[in-house]
Image: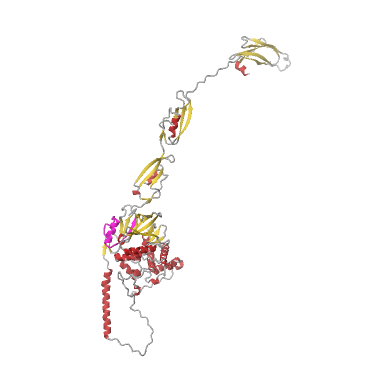
Amino acid sequence: MSKKRINDRYEIDRPIGGGGMADVYLAKDLILDRSVAVKMLKSQFSKDDEFIRRFRREAQSATSLSHPNVVNIYDVGEEEDLYYIVMEYVEGQTLKDYIQEQGKLTVHETVRILKQMTAAVEHAHDNHIVHRDLKPHNILLSVDGTAKVTDFGIARAISEATITHTNSVLGSVHYLSPEQARGGQVTYKSDLYSLGVVTYEMLTGEVPFSGDTAVSVAIKHLQEPLPALREQLPDIPQSVENLVMKATAKDPSLRYESAEDMINDLQTILDPSRANEKPFMNQFPDEEMTKAVPIVGADSTTDHDQTMMHPNSKMRETATFENKNENPPKKRGTKFWVKISLLALVFFVGLIFVVFFLIPSWLHVDDVEIPEGLVGMHYDEAFETLTELNLEVEQDVRFDDEIEEDHVISHRPSAGQFVKEGTVVTLVVSEGIEPVEMADFIGETKDFAEQNLADYQDIEIEYEETLDYTDDTVLEQSPEAGEMVQPQETVVRLTVSERPTFIMSNLSNMTRDEVLETISSQPLLDLETEEEYHPSIEEGRVISQSPSRGDEIRERTTVNVVFSRGPEPVEEPPEEEEEEPISTEVAFTVEVPESDNGDNENENEDASYRIRISVTDMENRTPNQVIDEEISEDTTFNVPMTVAPGDSGFLILFVGEDEFEESPYEYTYEQLKEQ
């Protein structure tokens, strides 16, 4: 039925539970976009018009309930002879499963859950709805610990249908009140009795009464007192035991007056002052009282509480005035007592016949053996096999890595055991491999993703070129992160980044436009240009490039291209101006030597020297004397000299008749030009 749509609104996902009357599926409300639970009646009940009428009436009445501890009913409908109820989906587990996991609950946790259950029952009673089938299987615990009661009102319709179809009592008899067990009238206090039994099971981890058959358990609810809690759990407060004993009193009049009364008691039940309060005295019915045993199918409205009479009970006396004129009663004779004795004998013989022959035949239930081979069988086939043996079937779904979906993992009772007809057999059915939440690999490396996806069926990888990420970075994934998937059946598709790769082209001898077209087509390349003269390459074409042709480019790279400016032009040397000879005067100083004898300072005051200066230059190819003078002190002479470009002029100094030892003095054209 997976992915089937109901009323074009509810898309069935997978089964999450069920029993003999209905199957429960997880579905999605396509209009409100939320998960819901759809309880769908089995086909054999869809043919019973009277049952369908009652079922719809009770289910619709339950839609009036709105309470945080009640599983809300959203919709009731029918499609193709399939009758369904759409309810709030509670993610979690049943209280029954939780008790089986924990063994027993603490007193504080028990009181916390009981407060929520009782609040739900009070809300239903305020709306004139009796549950009739309160048990841990109908209590759901959400992941945050909130208790929610389900199937309000529906139990009444199902109970009548169960008797009609199977001639047996509804559901688990372990939580049935005494008045329900004997077919009496069901009241609000019947739900309180069931709450007391559920509380007992939460505290001890087991039901108070058990037996081979449902009838034997029902008789214990009628006749046996509830086992004392403090004998098993000496540490629990007396107030908690009192609550359980009061809620499960055989006589409804001794129970709490209402669910509200029970809630008020729960508010202070754990106060230290109540830990050792006086035990509750449960007035158990006198064992000598005659009890009426109902016949299956009898009028369920008969008040069997009124069919008990103690043989030693005294008739209430009525005061009367004796009439002295009245005749005294006649004394009864022997015949009277003989008749009475015969009637009594017949009565006791009949009573013995009823007790030892009729009642056992009424209560007799055949034994059947749980068949082999249920494990691994498809649920529908196993259900049919067990119902043919007149056994009730309850479905418990769970994930399993080995057993195929919708096939039986295990069952309780186990194969080969003998049980009574009507016994509930729990089939643990596989939902397949438990789905896991898909991890988020966006931004991770391909290697990391592959390592963490080793358990998946397959991994498909697609590459996408991008400059925004390094190589092998996961860009996209399917299924998306957060989706619930079954790894062994899931193919994961990853889109992984790949840096673009470019093999450098040969740009040699290309024109500028051709280079621009080549570079711009590659996102990794940037262009930088230079120009140089080249003797043989035409102007505007490439002389050289870097990177070279054939190089692999994987990162953003700047390509340096040198374009030719053509041959370098030859520049003619500038014409040199013809230089003119320089005619100038050379300042030439003649220094007079100092006297060697410092004692006679005036001895050489009148000493003089004859100075003659001759010049050899452009105009005087031979020495030409230009100065002839007597000097007695340092004297500077301006000697005329003319020198042609590239030549030198010479000055010759004579002191007296002798040429001065440092003479001649040379003056080049450049030196004279700089003067």
Q: Where is residue 105 in the image (x, y as percent from the top left)?
A: 39, 62
How many numbered marks have been drawn onto this rendered protein structure? 0
Q: Position of residue 21 (x, y in %)?
A: 32, 61
Q: In which quarter of the image is residue 151?
A: bottom left
Q: Can residue 150 be seen here?
A: yes
- Residue closer to the observer: 501 or 666: 501
The image quadrant where one finds the C terminus is top right
**Residue 450 can be seen in this image:** no
In magenta segment, residue 388: yes
For this view, does 66 lie left or right of residue 430?
right
Asked whether residue 191 is drawn in magenta, I would say no
Region rendered in magenta: 370-398
326 lies left or right of 667? left
Q: Quadrant of the N terminus?
A: bottom left
Q: Quadrant of residue 494?
A: top left
Looking at the rendering, which quadrant does residue 60 occupy? bottom left
Indicate the position of residue 651 as horizontal and vertical percent values. 63, 13
Q: Residue extending furthest right?
A: 602
89 with respect to 165 (left or right): right
380 relative to 494, above or below: below
Q: Is 400 above or below relative to 106?
A: above
Q: In this view, does 612 lie above or below 36?
A: above
Residue 208 position within the rendered picture, expressed as x and y whole percent measured from the top left: 35, 66
- Work out whether residue 672 or residue 561 is closer to the camera in this orientation and state it: 561
Q: Which colour scheme is used?
A: secondary structure
Figure check: 551 above or below 289? above
Residue at screen point 30% across, 68% down = 215
